[in-house]
Image (cartoon, rainbow, N blue to C red):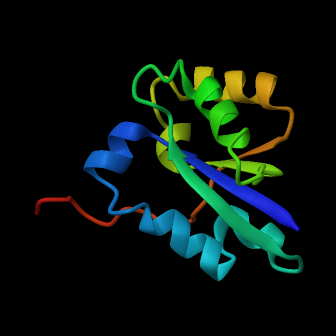
Amino acid sequence: MEKILIIGCRKTMDQICFGCTRCLTAFNRNQGEFVRYMKQEAELIGLTACADCPGTILVPRLALQWNSPLGEVPTKIHLAPCLVKCPHGQAIVDEVKAKCGIEIIEGTHPYQHVGAIFG
């Protein structure tokens, strides 16, 4: 079974995205980058953020989560579009890829923003 962790941008998750519903909806519907799990068992074990700009403490945060007494360790990490598009995103992606030792998938949901947020 694949154990999936989603990582997003702290600023987006706290201020714009309502509970990261697009990422969660795509996972539940096997859409976007989650279509790869359609014919296998996959479980979402976490949704976390980069720890704010410039995201330099993300890898230590992940290590603390993985060493928790729950014993849940991800087999795949999905980077939410908000993190992939972040000005610091590529540095964060590079650090996570270099230090985590598991597959990193850039992307989650296929949904586009429609119109302006406030009219």
Residue at the spot 85% in from the left edge and 40% down from the top edge? 102
Is 71 placed left or right of 1 in the picture? left
- The residue positioned 32% from the left and 63% from the top of the image is 18
Tell me the quarter of the picture where residue 12 sits.
top left
Location of the N terminus (image quadrant): bottom right
Report if residue 111 is visible in the image.
no
Q: Is residue 113 left or right of residue 65?
A: left
Q: Say if 24 sits above or below 94 in the image.
A: below
Question: Where does the C terminus fall, quadrant-wise?
Answer: bottom left
Q: Quadrant of residue 90?
A: top right
| On screen, residue 40 above or below 89 | below
Q: Position of residue 116 (x, y in %)?
A: 20, 59
Instruction: Residue at 78% x, 49% y: name it.
Output: 73
Q: Position of residue 20 (x, y in %)?
A: 43, 61
Which residue lies at the image location 40% right of the left edge and 39% below the top edge? 10
Asked if residue 48 can be seen in this view, the reply is: yes
> In the rendered view, would you say 106 is above or below 111?
above
In this picture, residue 112 sits left or right of residue 43: left
